[in-house]
Image (cartoon, helix red, strand yellow):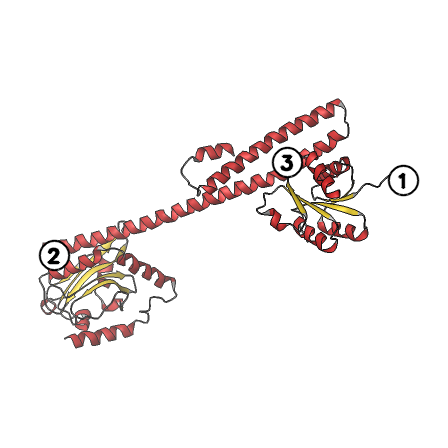
Amino acid sequence: MEKQRRPVVLVVEDEPLMLMDAVDLVTEAGFEAIGTKNADEAIRILESRADIRIVFTDVNMPGSMDGIKLAHAVRHRWPPIEIIVTSGLTLANVEELLPERGVFFPKPYTPAQVASALHRLAA
Amino acid sequence: MMAEIEETLKNADRGTTSTNLSSVSNFDAALTADITSISQIDAVASILEIVCRTAGMGFAAVARVTRDRWVACAVRDEIAFGLLPGGELDVKTTICDEIRDSGRAGIIDHVAQDEHFRDHHTPRMYGLQSYISMPIILPNGAFFGTLCAIDPRPARLNRPEIIGMFKNFAQLIAFHLDAQARAAKQDAALLDAQEAAKLREQFVTILAHDLRNPLASIDAGVNVILRRKPDEKTRSIGEQIHKSARRMAALIDDILDFARGRLAAGSCLSVIPTRRFSII
């Protein structure tokens, strides 16, 4: 019997150590993690493969898009993909900034938070 | 007589090009400020009224006199002399010019009987017979202008009580002008200090926010190392880094809480400045 493939999560984070940590957490939670350091690269990866289930992104990043814009772009171009947005900044009315079905949690986040959000969205 | 005065005034005005005080030069702006300063001294109107009544003069003014300008700052005109605040005379046609140079009062009881002024151009030009002008000297020694009065009739001005009155009023005006200038300076200094305090607090807030990111990176890096089952020594170092990072995060939170509290309270400058500096 073929082992069921783990769902793929695209992690977008410009701080290398934060990215490594996030990729670890996603992997530990039972997912396949792909790490990338900005939204433009994230879009290229999304265009190149069809198996991504969840995008997990930071807000403040260099490049043409921040995490919020990326979230909207994903919702618009790949409607089935789930979106998690995280930030160290205190954002007022962050829920209103997110696209439909977008999930936000502030940094610093715990492994349990990440795991439970991923499982809920992947279910 | 009045027609004559009007005529000479017109002639005098012809000699000056700028009675328009909204003119653009800095010099005019400074003169406009001087007129405003005088207009803000409530006592000036009363001073001019008392001066006219007591000395029996029909026209009195506080004039700003520079090397090449004579500008009326405040005026009491009972003889339709025709000069309004902001109005200008060609300084060379006035005796105030000489007052400015000498720094001493000028007094003429009766022009027709005065040896020096009988043939002077000013009385002839403005049709006046009596004249008094007291320099307004600011406390720093600078010459501001004059408190002056004229009348087409002779008057007994050369008396100690009249001279004393003019002298005292001129001093009073100078004192008011100086107090105004100092108050304006203090206001400006206070505004600067408030602005600087606000900027400093904004800077502290932004700095504290920006410190969080690299700190989170350090913490995340240690997480990554500890997850890779390191030897005991490395693990212990990692734990120590975690501890330090948590301590630093708490300090940053303190700074942010403090800055937020102060900003929310409206940046009150003088409450507890030493505590703020000790936290930074």
The residue indicated by pointer 2 is B162
The percent coordinates of residue B208 (x first, y second) are: 56, 39
Query: Element type at marker 2?
Result: helix
Tell which subunit mark 3 falls on.
Answer: B
- Earlier along the polypeptide chain: callout 2 or callout 3? 2
Foreground mark, 1 or 2?
1
Task: Please check whether the numbered discs 1 and 3 fall on a single chain.
Answer: no
Of B14 and A9, nearer the camera is: A9
Task: Please check whether the numbered discs 2 and 3 fall on a single chain.
Answer: yes
Q: Which mark is residue A2?
A: 1
Q: For the residue carrying disc 3, how many other residues have a C-alpha within 10 Å: few (<14), some (14-19), or many (20+)? A: some
> Which residue is drawn at the image coordinates 35% and 63% (left, top)?
B28
The residue indicated by pointer 3 is B215
Q: For the residue carrying disc 2, how many other residues have a C-alpha within 10 Å: few (<14), some (14-19), or many (20+)? A: some
Compared across the picture, whether B212 is left or right of B179 comes to right
The percent coordinates of residue B223 (x first, y second) are: 71, 32
> Which residue is drawn at the image coordinates 67% and 52% (left, top)?
A69
Q: CA distance from mark 2 to mark 3?
A: 79 Å
Which amino acid does the dot numbered 3 rest on?
Leu
Foreground mark, 2 or 3?
3
Query: Element type at marker 1?
Result: loop
> Which residue is drawn at the image coordinates 34% and 50% (left, top)?
B184
Residue B252 quadrant:
top right
Q: CA distance from mark 1 to mark 3?
A: 43 Å
